[in-house]
Image (cartoon, rainbow, N blue to C red):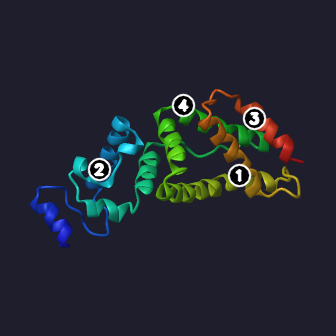
Amino acid sequence: MAKSDEGDACAGKRGSIGARRNPATEAAILDAAAEIVEDGGIGALTMEAVARRARAGKATVYRWWPTRGALLLAVYERQKQIGAFPDTGTLEGDVAAVLRLLFAHWGRPEGAVFRHIIAAAQSDPDLAEALEAYRQERLESLMQVIGRTAARGELAEDVSAADMASAVMAMAWLHLLTGHLDADPVALARVLVRGWGQ
């Protein structure tokens, strides 16, 4: 047993099982992080506070989430309730469906968490790095949606799926940050598609 984990066991804390994550410990850490953010905002979240509330070793927290930003995004990811994006058969319909799902999701408490993450990342390098990695993952997912419409010839020849996906993401994040989640996804999709489609 590693020294840090041995110390945890002796102190009566939840122990780690090395490289593999103990599900109970992982849940306790994410629960603790979510509670701290809810009680005191993102500024109150520290690895020390999370470890203390979760009764887990600080070394365990850092091993699984090397930065505070990575931990924050893990909290948000666990709260997400977004299913697969539907295939409506048209570019405009797919874009509207994406925006509709995102706006509905962000209308719940999870949206406030993600909005705070984006805002805090502007002055927190660790959080900015974690957010950029998450943004790239989301872009990949959106590119798959746009890619199937491009295969049907619905994108202009000089527009890539990556560019269209970036435009959709920018539109979505803008409405999250400005608190306009009541916007009409169909109207927004029409604006995007008429500017980027055939």
Tell me if 130 is positioned left or right of 36 in this view.
right
Q: CA distance from mark 4 to mark 2?
A: 26 Å
* Three-letter amino acid code at the position of disc 4: Gly
Q: Residue 166: percent from the left, percent from the top?
A: 71, 52
Dot 1 alpha-carbon crowd within 10 angstroms: few under 14, some 14 to 19, many 20 or more: some
Q: Which residue is mark 4?
A: 107
Residue that mark 2 sits on:
50
Q: CA distance from mark 1 to mark 4?
A: 22 Å
Q: Is residue 14 above or below residue 89?
A: below
Residue type, numbered disc 2: Val
The answer to whether the residue labelled 2 contacts the one labelled 3, judged by CB atoms less than 8 Å apart, is no
- Most foreground residue, 115 or 121: 121
Left or right of residue 50, residue 128 in this image: right
Q: Which mark is first along the chain, 1 or 3? A: 1
Looking at the image, tell me whether mark 2 or mark 3 is earlier in sequence order. 2
Label 4–label 3 contact, CB within 8 A: no
* Residue 118 at x, y percent in the picture: 54, 46
Placement of 184 over or under 143, stated as above or below: above
Please tell me which of labels 4 and 3 falls first in the chain. 4
The quadrant in which residue 94 appears is: top right
Rendered residue at 76%/51% (across/down)? 164
Quadrant holding the N terminus: bottom left
User: CA–CA distance between discs 2 and 1?
Assistant: 34 Å
Q: Looking at this view, is 39 or 77 the one in front?
A: 39
Q: Which residue is mark 1?
A: 166
The answer for how far apart the CA atoms under marks 3 and 1 are is: 14 Å
Give the secondary structure at mark 4: loop
What residue is disc 3 on?
Answer: 188
- In the displayed structure, would residue 165 be above or below residue 106? below
Question: Disc 4 and disc 3: Cα gap in Å?
Answer: 17 Å
Q: Tell me the crowding category of disc 4: few under 14, some 14 to 19, or many 20 or more residues within 10 angstroms, Cα based.
A: some
